[in-house]
Image (cartoon, grey):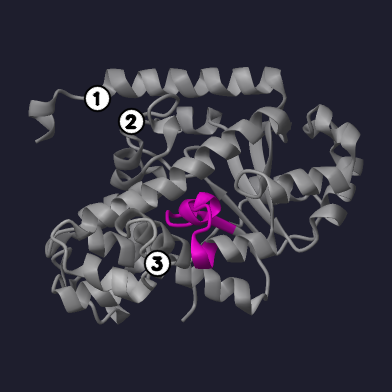
Amino acid sequence: MTLPVLHNTGVLYRRILSQFPQDISLAFAYGSGVFKQQGTSQGQMEKNMLDFVFAVDDPVTWHTMNLLQNRKHYSILKLLGPTKISSIQNEYGAAVYYNTLVPVDGRIIKYGVISTESLINDLMHWKTMYVAGRLHKPVKMLVQGENGKLHAALVANLKSAVTASFLMLPESFTEEELFLQIAGLSYAGDFRMILGEDRSKVANIVKDNTEHFRILYSNILRDCSQVVYKPQQGKLEVDKSPEGQFIQLMALPRTLQQRITKLVDPPGKNRDVEEILLQVAQDPDCGAVVQQGVSSIVKSSSITQSIKGIATAGLWKTVSYSSKKLRKMWRGWRRKPPVSQMS
C-alpha cells in the first residue's frame, strides 16, 4: 500500500528547505502554522510558527553542514561541536534536537532533527511516541526518500494508532470520535497539556481537518478485519470480544505492550507478555489500561524532551516560546464554551 501523504509543492516550503543541508531522508511540516485549526483565522495562521521535523541518516555530518550554513540557529551548545550536538540529540529526551524561533524567509520556524534509525524505532515500537505521535495526525510531507524500511514504519505507525484507539473506544463510534481518539494519543499524559497548551487543542486539530484524517486512515480502516467501516455514514463497529481485544493487544507496539504488562503484572510474578495481555483482553477496564500505558510513554518523553529543549533552545528562546504557548492556552480557555453548550 502507498502511504497517503499531503504533498505540498508551495514555494514557501521549498525556499525554507533550500536553506538546509539536503541530505534528508524525510521532512515534514506540521502544526497550527501549516493546518488550519478551529478558532484560528487565516491571518493568525500565517503569523504562527512553522514546525518541521527532518530525519537524517548521519546526524554528525548533517549538523556539521548545518553549523556551517546556519550557525546562528543554535544555542550556546554550538560551541560543543557537531559530534556532541549529535550525542545530545540521540541520547537524551526523545532523540530529537530542536532549534526554535528561527527566522527563515520571512517566517519564524522551529525544526527538529532526528536520526532515521531513531525515527524508525519510534514509529515501529513507540519508544517515546514523540515524533510517531506527530505523524498520527495529518502532516505536509515535503521530502520522502526511497527508504523501504522507513516507508513500512510510517504505515505501521498509523495502523498502531488505529489499533490502540479501537481498544479505548466503545463497540460503535463515529469517524470523528475515532479521529479525536487518534489525535489525542500523543497528548495523553503530556504535562504541557496542563501548563502551556490550549486544552481544546485536540478538538481544534480534528474539527477543521476531518478530510485530511480520512485521506490518512481510510485505506487502513477498509483493510482492517477487526472493524466494520461505513464511510458513507461515517460510522464504525469494532470487535470488543475478549478474542478480538486480544488480537488488538498483540498487535500493539512493543513499548506499549511492555508498559501495559508493567501496570497489570505484580512485581516478582514475571509472567510472559502473551499471558498478561490475555488477562487484559478479558478485563472490562481494558481500554483504561491501554490509555494508562500510552500516558506513561508520553509523560516521560514530554518531560525529558522539554528539559532538553531548554538547553538546545537557550534560556531567552525558552522563555519567549513558553510565554507564547501560555498566551495561546489562555486564548483557548477564553474561547471554550460552557459545558451545557458542548453537550
Residue that badge 1 annotates: 336
Between 66 and 257, which is closer to the camera in this rendering?
Answer: 257
**Count of marks placed on residues:** 3
Q: Position of residue 213 (x, y in %)?
A: 35, 58
Task: Point out which mark residue 27 bears.
Answer: none
Residue at horizontal 16%, vertical 68%?
Answer: 282
Residue at horizontal 30%, vertical 74%?
Answer: 275
Residue 311 falls in image quadrant: top right
Asked if residue 147 lies left or right of residue 198, the reply is: right
- The residue type indicated by label 2 comes to Arg
Magenta span includes 135:
yes
Q: In the rendered image, which quarter contains the C terminus?
A: top left
Residue that badge 2 annotates: 199
Between 166 and 223, which is closer to the camera in this rendering?
Answer: 166
- If you read the primary sequence from the N terminus, does the residue marked by circle 2 or circle 1 appear first? 2
Between 89 and 134, which is closer to the camera in this rendering?
Answer: 89
Is any atom of residue 4 visible in this view?
A: no
Magenta part of the chain: 123-141
